[in-house]
Image: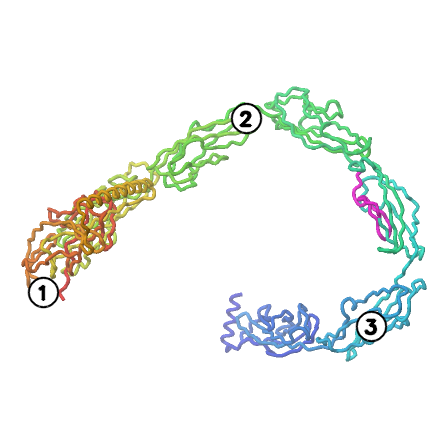
């Protein structure tokens, strides 16, 4: 089909592209209002495209209309000829509906050529005849009481559909000839004589016609009925006054027919109304015919009829619903009993459990205590029992004496007896309870007798104990084992499994779950070999009779699921630019541990930040302790190096597992350490120096808190409270001492004293400085001032050789090129740092292996950990700045 469409498209392209279009459209057509369905509105054709592709079935079609309507559709005539017809879904009404419709007709062929044209349809007006209002159009019955004076009877009304404003006058005519009636031009019907019903003419048929101004007409009929009146008492014509009926007659059954007549006219009895004046619920009377029917169930065996079966009624007959003439008569009904209740029992199915060692002649059931007959009189209320029939119970049960309904045991019910096992130790006895009177109703009674066995075999597990292995990385919900218990007693009862003891931890009360029906063991949460490698469960199995328990040992298989943890986790180092290759930078080393890996399983690598591979670790694998070495020298002069501050991300991988370790499968975990290394350049610019070289240390302590270590927050809170109490006490004692020894008040603008070795900053923080005895082993002339200054080739410390060039005092904010003073909060101070005696730059007084996770102060430089003593060494100066 697709190849045919492509061929048609190709033909259309080669023939010049003449398109598909609709012939005789656009156009305007007319359609009369109230047109029936399938009325032709407009015919048109389709001119095929040059490809001669046929029109897709279903096209052309009306895709839109204004206003929206479903009155029109497109119908295929033949070939390429079509027409628009009415659908009949909506009525075209010139007076009330829209008069003009714009239909958009759309056509499409198989190659996708389309055309859209508009057909305008105008609804034309058609003169319609007048119409009568309401039910009058179908004819109407009118009633006139005899003896009524001549005059107005009825006002006939009609309307003209063309006259929406109801201003056109219509003319009314009485077509049928009658001397007793006349009609005015506006439709008023009058009587011209007084009517008498007894004279024999009691109804008249009249035809009324209405005409409009153009002569269109419509007609309807009026049936005028003369209503008779009477003034005589009705008279009963039925002679019977007592009736005998049977109980349980169906509602609606006729039990009596009361008749009466009206002396005014023997044929007037159909207008008599009957009713029962006595309050009762058993009978009802037809108001027009006088027949008495059963209204509800007549049960001689229950309620008031069981005590008194006689019902007395008073019947009233009258000739009109209200007022008029009436008469009364007394009648009685005697309800007789029938055998309509079969002998029944409180239940018809009995289930009896009999011990297997029950004695013979044991009475199992007495049916007389549960069966009865509700009939009110004998012999309808009497019953007996038939001989029982048994399925698989022959020779085991008997009714004794016959017909008494007493079932006794006469056979053996040993549960292990092969014949009893073949019968499933289940027996069925069927017996009937029946009436002794016709029609001998019967009801089946089913007795199911079950033998109850004794508990002879214990409940045991198929193994004396169980042992299961599961990997510590298995997720919650993992099925890892199953226990099974059996009981040889018959019949088998369901066994319920439960975990009685074991399988708990500090976080979870239940780590394992057992399916109570199947005994399958599953994980509730993940397990951890490092926390608990072995679990011992006590699993209990219980059925309706016995209980047993078994021990289950669960071995947690170790997996490499712990990441290496190294000390320190982050650190800041400062090294001179001319540090020798192979030097252990500030004696820095990493000490790593892994809960599930050997100390020889670690491998070290440096990730992003090791530009030009200046740094390396030795050893790089096979040890949990490694040192940071300078691998290549720095070349800032030649332009190879441009970075002065390095941030190294160190990866510690534990993939070097020991082959002898028991494990489920090999996994690899990687930890990380962050190192910040600052390279200190040679001084080449003028730097404002102080009279005494000093190194400023900033100590930042940080407590690394783990959410799982709940005791940390407890210890911190308790320590904070004790510290607060101590500080308050100390401040009180200090205030008392000041008040005793210094009664004078401090001046308002007097600056507070600062201890020697500390610098007070503007934010209330103290910068701790340490005086160092620096050896200056070099001398150089400053290219800007021409003055000479000395420097230390290892630490980069400098001073002017001429004392006049030295700064008079140390400022908290150093000029360009000087090392900034690092601010310390009052509670972050720590032990001072000293200069490395070996000349390998500046290092902390504490060893690297004692350091913890690091942090950064506010100036962005890495700081020392909060929870350890080693301080952080800052470099003595910034990189040299070019002269301006």
Quadrant position of residue 466:
top left
Tell me how the rendering is colored.
Answer: rainbow
- Nearest the viewer among 815 and 471 is 815
- Quadrant of the image for the C terminus? bottom left
- Other residues around mark 2 within 10 Å, as few (<14) / some (14–19) / many (≥20): some
Which residue bears the numbered disc 1? 784
x and y, in percent, of residue 361 in the image: 68, 20
Label 1, label 2: how many angstroms apart (C-alpha)? 110 Å
Label 3, label 2: how many angstroms apart (C-alpha)? 102 Å
- Other residues around mark 3 within 10 Å, as few (<14) / some (14–19) / many (≥20): some
- Quadrant of the image for the N terminus? bottom right
Which residue bears the numbered disc 3? 188
- Count of marks, rendered view: 3
**SS of the residue under disc 1:** loop
In this view, the mark in front (3 or 2): 3
Left or right, residue 55 beside residue 635: right
**SS of the residue under disc 2:** loop
- Other residues around mark 1 within 10 Å, as few (<14) / some (14–19) / many (≥20): few
Left or right, residue 571 beside residue 46: left
Image disc number at residue 489: 2
Residue range (magenta)? 276-299
| Dot 3 or dot 2, earlier in sequence | 3
x and y, in percent, of residue 748 in the image: 20, 55
Label 1, label 3: how many angstroms apart (C-alpha)? 132 Å
């Amino acid at each position: 089909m697709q190849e045919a469409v492509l061929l048609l498209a190709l033909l259309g392209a080669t023939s010049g592209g003449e398109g598909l279009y609709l012939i005789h459209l656009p156009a305007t057509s007319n359609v009369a209002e109230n047109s029936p369905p399938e009325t032709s509105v407009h015919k048109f054709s389709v001119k095929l495209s040059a490809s001669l592709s046929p029109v897709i079935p279903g096209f052309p079609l009306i895709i839109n209309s204004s206003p929206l309507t479903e009155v029109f559709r497109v119908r295929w005539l033949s070939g390429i000829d079509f027409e628009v017809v009415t659908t009949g879904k909506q009525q075209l009404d010139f007076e009330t509906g829209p008069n003009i419709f714009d239909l958009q007709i759309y056509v499409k062929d198989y190659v996708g050529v389309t055309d859209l044209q508009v057909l305008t349809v105008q609804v034309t007006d058609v003169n319609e005849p007048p119409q009568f209002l309401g039910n009058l159009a179908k004819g109407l019955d009118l009633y006139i009481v005899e003896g009524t004076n001549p005059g107005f009877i009825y006002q006939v009304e009609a309307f003209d559909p063309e006259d929406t404003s109801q201003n056109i006058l219509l003319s009314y005519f009485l077509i049928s000839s009658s001397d007793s009636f006349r009609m005015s031009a506006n439709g008023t019907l009058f009587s011209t004589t007084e009517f008498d019903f007894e004279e024999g003419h009691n109804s008249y048929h009249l035809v009324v016609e209405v005409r409009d101004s153009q002569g269109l007409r419509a007609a309807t009929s009026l049936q005028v009925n003369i209503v008779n009146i009477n003034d005589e008492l009705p008279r009963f014509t039925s002679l019977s006054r007592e009736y005998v009926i049977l109980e349980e007659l169906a509602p609606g059954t006729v039990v009596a027919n009361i008749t009466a007549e009206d002396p005014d006219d023997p044929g007037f009895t159909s207008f008599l109304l009957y009713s029962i004046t006595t309050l009762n619920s058993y009978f009802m009377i037809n108001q027009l015919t006088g027949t008495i029917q059963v209204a509800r169930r007549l049960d001689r065996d229950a309620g008031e009829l069981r005590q008194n079966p006689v019902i007395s009624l008073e019947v009233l007959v009258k000739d009109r619903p209200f007022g008029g003439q009436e008469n009364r008569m007394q009648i009685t009904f005697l309800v007789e009993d029938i055998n309509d209740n079969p002998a029944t029992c409180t239940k018809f199915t009995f289930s009896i459990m009999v011990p297997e060692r029950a004695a013979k002649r044991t009475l199992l059931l007495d049916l007389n205590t549960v069966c009865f007959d509700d009939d009110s009189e004998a012999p309808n209320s009497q019953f007996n029992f038939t001989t029982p029939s048994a399925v698989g119970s022959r020779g085991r049960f008997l009714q004794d004496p016959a017909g008494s309904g007493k079932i006794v045991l006469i056979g053996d019910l040993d549960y292990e007896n092969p014949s009893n096992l073949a019968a499933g130790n289940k027996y069925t006895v069927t017996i009937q309870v029946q009436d002794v009177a016709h029609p001998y109703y019967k009801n089946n009674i089913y007795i199911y007798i079950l033998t109850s066995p004794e508990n002879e075999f214990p409940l045991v597990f198929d193994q004396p104990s169980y042992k299961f292995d599961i990997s510590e990385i298995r997720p919650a919900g993992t099925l890892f084992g199953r226990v099974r218990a059996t009981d040889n007693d018959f019949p088998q009862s369901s066994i319920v499994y439960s975990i009685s003891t074991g399988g708990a931890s500090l976080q979870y009360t239940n780590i394992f779950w057992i399916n109570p029906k199947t005994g399958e063991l599953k994980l509730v949460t993940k397990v951890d070999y490092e926390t608990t490698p072995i679990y011992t469960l006590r699993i209990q199995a219980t059925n309706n009779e016995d209980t047993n328990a078994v021990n289950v040992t669960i071995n947690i298989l170790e997996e490499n699921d712990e990441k290496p943890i190294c000390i320190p986790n982050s650190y800041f180092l400062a090294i001179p630019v001319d540090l020798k290759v192979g030097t252990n930078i500030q004696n820095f080393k990493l000490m790593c541990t892994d809960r599930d890996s050997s100390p020889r399983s670690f491998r070290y690598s440096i990730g992003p930040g090791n530009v030009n591979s200046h740094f390396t670790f030795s050893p790089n694998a096979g040890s949990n302790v490694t040192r940071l070495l300078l691998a290549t020298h720095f070349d800032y002069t030649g332009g190879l190096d441009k970075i002065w501050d390095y941030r190294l991300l160190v990866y510690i991988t534990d993939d070097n597992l020991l082959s002898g370790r028991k494990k489920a499968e090999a996994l690899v975990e990687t930890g990380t350490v962050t190192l910040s290394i600052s390279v200190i350049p040679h001084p080449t610019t003028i730097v404002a120096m102080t009279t005494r070289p000093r190194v400023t240390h900033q100590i930042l302590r940080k407590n690394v808190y783990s959410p799982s270590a709940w005791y940390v927050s407890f210890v911190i809170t308790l320590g904070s409270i004790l510290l607060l109490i101590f500080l308050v006490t100390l401040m009180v004692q200090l205030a008392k001492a000041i008040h005793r020894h210094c009664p004078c008040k401090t001046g308002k603008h007097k600056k507070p004293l600062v201890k020697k070795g500390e610098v007070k900053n503007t934010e209330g923080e103290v910068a701790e400085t340490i005086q160092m005895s620096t050896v200056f082993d070099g001398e150089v002339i400053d290219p800007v001032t021409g003055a000479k200054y000395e420097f230390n080739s290892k630490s980069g410390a400098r001073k002017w050789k001429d004392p006049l060039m030295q700064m008079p005092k140390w400022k908290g904010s150093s000029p360009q090129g000087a090392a900034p003073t690092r601010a310390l909060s009052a509670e972050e101070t720590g032990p001072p740092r000293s200069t490395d005696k070996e000349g390998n730059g500046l290092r902390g007084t504490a060893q690297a292996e004692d350091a913890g996770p690091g942090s950064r102060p506010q100036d962005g430089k890495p700081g020392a950990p909060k929870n350890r003593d080693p301080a952080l060494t800052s470099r003595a100066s910034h990189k040299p700045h070019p002269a301006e």
